[in-house]
Image (cartoon, rainbow, N blue to C red):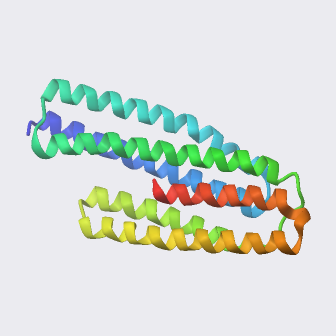
Amino acid sequence: MSKQLECNLECLQNKLITMADIAETMVRDSLNAITKWDIKLFKPVEEAEEKMDMFQKEIDDDIVRMISVYTPVAGDLRFLLMATRITVELERIGDKTIDIGFYAKTLFKEPPMKTLVHLPDMAEKTIAMLKQAMNAYAEKDTAKAITVIKTDDEVDQLHDQIFKELITYVMADPSSISRIMELVLIARAFKRVGDH
């Protein structure tokens, strides 16, 4: 591997990690806005979405340039192709946080719910998954990557539990159905963050 390619690959990895940090902050800010029932707290999420789009385009352009200039093979080529997939997944995480804000705009027109039934727990697990996934990537650690996959099962179980609890809320108070539906959509968006 040429010294220049090695330098470019390291720079690319740093950009991916920065992009992941932005995605993590977006998820955390979304959770903060939900738990504080304050739509104004989604403003940084919306602003960060533009950064995510910029990073995805910049990284994709870097990868195309590196492939055409250096004609990488084997591990370097796999690294570059994997990086294109990672940027897509990170950008989709950003999209999911925007979806959460969209659902919250409707939800926050109603009085706050007394409890968010495990939603913060699920969101925190997805944040931890993102952090662990990027650590596994940076350290090239397969065992850590497998741990992330197993954690997704826990997120799925929490999602199912939240759904069941929200249904019992509707049965106890049918007038709460609009709020419950928005919370179902928000929970599903956090679940999708974990999937990505």
Name above or below for residue 154 compared with residue 107: below
* Residue 127 percent location from the top left of the image: 51, 62
Name above or below for residue 74 compared with residue 135: above
Closer-to-camera residue (145/163): 163
Left/right of residue 188 with respect to residue 52 in the rendered view:
right
Name the residue rendered at 26%, 70% in the picture: 143
Left/right of residue 139 with respect to residue 175 in the rendered view:
left
Name above or below for residue 1 compared with residue 66: below
Left/right of residue 177 with respect to residue 20 in the rendered view:
right
Closer-to-camera residue (22/157): 157
Name the residue rendered at 38%, 66% in the picture: 149
* Residue 172 percent location from the top left of the image: 86, 75
Which quarter of the picture shows residue 87?
Answer: top left
Q: Is residue 114 visible?
A: no
Q: Quadrant of the N terminus?
A: top left
* Residue 122 percent location from the top left of the image: 58, 68
Name the residue rendered at 47%, 32% in the picture: 54
Q: Is residue 27 visible?
A: yes
Closer-to-camera residue (172/31): 172
Left/right of residue 155 with respect to residue 116 in the rendered view:
left
Give the number of marks.
0
* Residue 152 percent location from the top left of the image: 45, 67
